[in-house]
Structures are given as C-alpha cells and as structure tokens.
Image: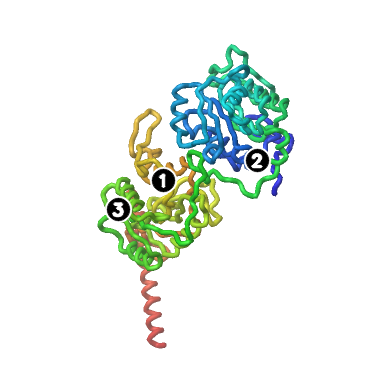
Amino acid sequence: MNTTQINSGDKGDSSNGVAFSSDIAWLKKAEGGWQFGEAGVIHAIANVIGCNKNAVEFGGGDILEHLTIQRLVSNGWNAMLIEADDAHYQSLVESVKHLELVKVLKQIVRPSGDDSLASIIASNSFENPDVVVIDVDSDDYYFMASCDSIRPKIICVEHHDTVDPTITKETPYVPSNEIIGTMVNGFNAQANVCAIEELANSMGYKRVWHSRVNSIFVLGDFYESLCNEPETIDSNFMFDAKGKKRDWSVSENPKVTLILSQPRLCFTDHSDRLINLAAKLKFNTFRSHGAFWDRDIECTTMSAIHMDDPDFLLYSDYDSVFDPNDVITMLDVIKADPTMAAIGAVQMSRHDDRPLVFESDKDYSKTTTNVEYHHFGLTLIRRKVFDELPHPWFWSTPGMKPDGTVGWDIPNRSDADITFWRLLRNANMKVVQHNEVVIGHMVLCVKWPKDTGYGVQLQPIEMYNRYGKPKTATINQEIYRLRMAEEAKRKQEQTNG
C-alpha cells in the first residue's frame, strides 16, 4: 500500500490557487463519469470505507448519465432522486425505469421544515443514506448544513465555480439571499469553496477531492482509511456511459471474424497475407467492396455480428502487409485485458513520414500505449463494443471555419474512421496501440535515378502527384560504371574460383 495523501500546505489545485491540503491524491485515478469525474470518485470512496448502499441525489440532472451517483445506482444501490423541474423529472423517470431500486420524486427540497431532506427521507420510508449529492445551483450551502441531522458518510456538494475571478477563493463567501441562485457574470451565485469547507469542517467532515464546481467530503472518522491507496482501483474504462460495470471477459480461445475493406481489384500481396493468416487462425471472412467505405464497412460489420457472433472483429485494409504472428500477438494482449476495447498495430502514413498514430506528448517506449484514435490497417475490436455505440458507427462530418463555412478540405473535419474512434472515446472505451507490432503500408512508387549513394530513389506516387519529379532525379554515370566494374570483378572471381 502506498500512502498518497497530499501533505498539509501542498496545492491540490495550482490552476486556481486554492489550497486543498486534505485532498487524497489517489482518488484522481478513480475519476470518471459525470461531471468532472465525481461519479468515479464517489464509487471508489464507497468501496473503501464501506456503505449501506443507500444514496440520495437532488437537482442532479435529467438522465442517468448526468447523475453523480450513476455508478452506484447502475451497480445495485438503492437510490432516491429528487427533481423539481417537470421536464427533468419526466426524462429522469424514463432514463432509470430499468432500475428497480431507484425511486424518483417530483418535489422541491428546502433547507428546513416539512420539505427538508430529512423529512422527505422519513416520509418515504427510505433508510438514512450513506451518500448524499447536493446539486441545486443556489442554496447548496444551507442544504449541506441540513445534512447534520442525517450524517451521511459521503457528501458531494456544489459550490461557486473556482474559475470565476470575481469571487475570492481564499476566504469564505456566501452570497446574499437577493442574488443567491441567480447568474452573475455568467456564473451561478453560490457559496464559494472556502465557505463550503468551513461549514463541512464544523460538521465533522473532511474534504478528500474537488473539481471546479464540486467538493466531496467524508466524515472525519473515515478519512484515515482513505489515505492508503488500494491495491486495485476501478478505472474509467470499466464502466459504460450509464455507469454500469462492463463484463468484457472472453474465453481462452475466442472467436475472431475478419472484416475486409477491399476494392474489386486489390493487391495480391495483401491476399497472400490473409491466406497465411487463415492457415493459423480459423475464422470466417466478411468482405466490404462497395464504392462507399463508411456505408459498406458498417453494413459488413453488422452482418458479421448478426451471422457469426464473434468475440472479436479483425479489420485489415487491402494495402496492409503483416505477418500472422502480428495478429496472434495483439489477440493475446486484448484477450488478457477485459477493459480493452480495441488494439491496433503501428503503421506508417501514406501521406508523410510519420506513423498514422503519433502524438508528441505520449510515451511509445512501452509495449502498449493508450491512444485517442487508431486506424483500420490491422486492428482488433471487441464485439461487445458495438452493443454500446449509437448508429451510425462510421460517418463523415465536414470541418468548420471560424466564419461558419464548412467543407471537406478543412483540417477539423472528421472522416468516417475517425468518427468511429471518437464514439469509443465518448463511451469511456480504452483504445491501445501495440508498439511492438509494426505492419507495412503498401504504396505505388516511382523509381528514379539519383546522383549520389546507391544511385536509386523511390518516390511514392502521391508525392509525385503533389510535388512532381524530385530535383535529385539526375543520373551520375560514374556510379553505374563503378557498379558494373564491381559486378564484372565478382563474376571473374567466381569463374576463377
């Protein structure tokens, strides 16, 4: 176990100058889900300190994905959701109707009286919760004070946005009743983070984590139990968009289906690799060879899932060159990691001298690297991924200029393959590049003479079409005379030998 508590006096949030000396550092690893990672942090805290699996959230949102306790309710907790807005209430009821342990109330909550949180809990025969989330954009300070009567183990409470430069973050601030809950300079007028912390401390709570707009507190008795980092921490990749834990484990011998993106005439070298692959791995093949890649790859994928029901889908572009062992290596890695959605190989771009996937701030020195997007040169995708993604899976969107005009030649466009990877990223799915599996990218080249070195250079046809003949495409006769003399000498030596 590693002790990871931030020491007193450290800055837990250097971006806004607020000292969060009690924040627990390892909780950042558990961030995930709504809103700035709060859902994952609450789930992690509850797992460590132990809770009665009862939670209350009010003012939180209109759908399950917008609940701070989404991971708790999606994984079997009893929950009471309180929402005063009629439209939000109706949407929330529809969103959680599949969760039998969740009760949704259309009701206004007040800091005291018959509509207080304690009174609502009692009148609905709901057991005192161990987790309370307060997200009302106004009287959050007073609602937190009212929690003193129910004493939940964990409280998540909203406060004034710490990026607002007009509100001090160093001294407590609670807005007057005249402006509380209104918009001032684009921000909700609420108690600031220091006022919320001061109140929490007076109630016997200590803050363990914060974001721009929320702080999470635990009863002081449970603070020490959070200071040691657990052996395992649930990652964001373990949960779907609704906060339900994924079950992506597969058998030791998973079923793989090959999806081919091919024109009617294609490279025989690629077909040779597929024949060799088929000799080692027994799989069915579904071929896409229409004129529209986005439509055809989607239809082919849907057919493969429906007809073959594989564990993994293997995609290979018709201009890729690889070895069967490349597929086996990637399959072994993704099979061993039930949180991995997709894994691909390293491949060079046809358009420049860089890998297709390369970001300057990422470390590619290890066996694998988590990446934001990938390609379809040689890529394995877990079949269950598609159960969570909205249709269409593959579609192109044009880019937009600052003046509002759109076009397909604008850098911020999204081609059909890139849109697919964005869908995975939006769904908290892990995409990995295997840095030790390197495949080739076939290109049509023009062969030119060169006046130095070996005397030959290859220019991809795309570069010729873009820039024309290379300036170094001139013949140096002495290179070839010397080479012919060397060849003649070797032949003479072979004859004499």
Q: Position of residue 457 (x, y in %)?
A: 37, 61
Q: Residue at 58% of width from left, 33% of height from top?
A: 55
Instruction: Please state which of residues 435 and 174 is positioned toward the viewer in this rendering.
Output: 174
Q: Which residue is mark 3?
A: 288
Q: Neighbour class for label 2 at 10 Å: few (<14), some, many (≥20)?
A: few
Front tag of 3 and 2: 2
The kind of residue on which mark 1 rests is Asp
Above or below, 352 relative to 127: below
Instruction: Please state which of residues 275 and 215 is positioned toward the viewer in this rendering.
Output: 215
Element marked by disc 2: loop
Q: Neighbour class for label 3 at 10 Å: few (<14), some, many (≥20)?
A: many
Q: Position of residue 167 (x, y in %)?
A: 62, 21
Above or below, 146 relative to 406: above
Q: Position of residue 115 (x, y in %)?
A: 58, 19
Instruction: Please state which of residues 405 and 340 is positioned toward the viewer in this rendering.
Output: 340
Label whose residue precedes the other's in the sequence (3 or 1): 3
Q: Residue at 37% of width from left, 29% of height from top?
A: 404
For marks 2 and 1, give the CA distance.
32 Å
The kind of residue on which mark 2 rests is Gly
Q: Quadrant of residue 14?
A: top right
Q: Which residue is mark 1?
A: 387
Element marked by disc 1: helix
Give the numbered dot on residue 50.
2
Q: Residue furthest top?
A: 178
Please state if 28 lies on the left or on the right of 313 as rendered. Answer: right
Element marked by disc 3: strand
Q: Residue at 45% of width from left, 54% of height from top?
A: 344
